Image (cartoon, rainbow, N blue to C red):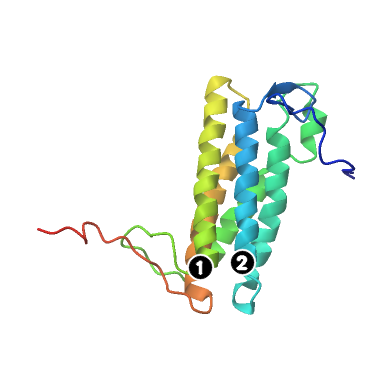
Amino acid sequence: MIKLTKIYTRTGDKGKTSLGDGTRVSKEDFRVDAYGTIDEANSVIGLARTRTKNAELILLDNILATIQNELFDLGAELSIPPSKENNLLIEKTKITNSQIDRIENEIDQLNVNLKDLDSFVLPGGTLASSYLHLARTIVRKSERLMVKMNSQKKGSISDTALKYINRLSDLLFVAARYSNQVDIGGTGDILWQPGSSREE
């Protein structure tokens, strides 16, 4: 059980922070940036969930509740540099292939009745959909940071974590479309119309 008794520690006042294993690093470290961006995405998903409590979106709300917990797991995994000594620390919250399989099934479940796309989707529509599109772009940003970390030092992040974050952005895209189609007041997809504002 995690017990938080004090909010401020005064240990981060000089631009340093502690990783999950106690290692002190700069707050501009790629690892800190990556798990900080995961936290950012999670906060926006929390915003989206303030708009998914109605009966039409209860399926989506349950999916997002699970994702929010898993993003804390992923943040915990990212906060601990992999090593033999740290394996036990990582093991409890490590992202698994079964979680990726579940996300893929959820994508299929949400996508089954959505219309085929013949153009790119513009973010917007319902508030829930708009927040989910925003969360998707932040997840993509986190994925890019994780890839940078791995390119700097191979094995910095598990392949499973990288695969999970990639699938999650797909899920959020489909979830945004689902919200726009199923929710009360949903507009359906708002599609990109290439060159529509040009004057010939």
Dot 2: few (<14), some (14–19), or many (≥20) neighbours within 10 Å? some
The residues tagged by marks 1 and 2 sit, at their Cα atoms, a distance apart of 8 Å
Residue at 82 percent of width and 33 percent of height: 9
Q: Residues within 10 Å of mark 1 (few under 14, many from 20)?
A: many
Q: Which mark is residue 60?
A: 2
Against 18, residue 140 (above or below) is: below
Q: Quadrant of residue 36?
A: top right
Instruction: Give the residue at mark 1.
Output: 178
Secondary structure of the residue carrying numbered label 1: helix
Q: Position of residue 127 (x, y in %)?
A: 53, 67
In the image, residue 151 sits, relative to residue 167, either above or below, namely above
Q: Nearer the viewer, residue 86 or 139?
A: 139
Answer above or below: position of 79 versus 58: above
Q: Amino acid at mark 2?
A: Leu
Between 24 and 118, the one nearer to me in the picture = 24
In the image, what residue type sits under mark 1?
A: Tyr
Image quadrant in which you'd find residue 6: top right
* Residue shown at the point (65%, 58%) measured from the top left: 46
Q: Are marks 1 and 2 in contact (CB under 8 Å)?
A: yes
Give the residue drawn at x 68%, y 34%. 78
Q: Which mark is residue 188?
A: none
* Residue 190 pos. (x, y %): 37, 66
Q: Quadrant of the N terminus?
A: top right
Choose the circle earlier in sequence order: 1 or 2: 2
Q: Is residue 88 visible?
A: yes
In this rendering, the answer to whether 139 lies above or below 67 is above
Query: Tag 2's secondary structure?
Result: helix
17 lies left or right of 117? right
Towards the viewer: 5 or 180: 5
Q: Quadrant of the C terminus?
A: bottom left
Q: Residue 180: x, y in percent?
A: 48, 70
The residue located at (56%, 39%) in the rendering is 142
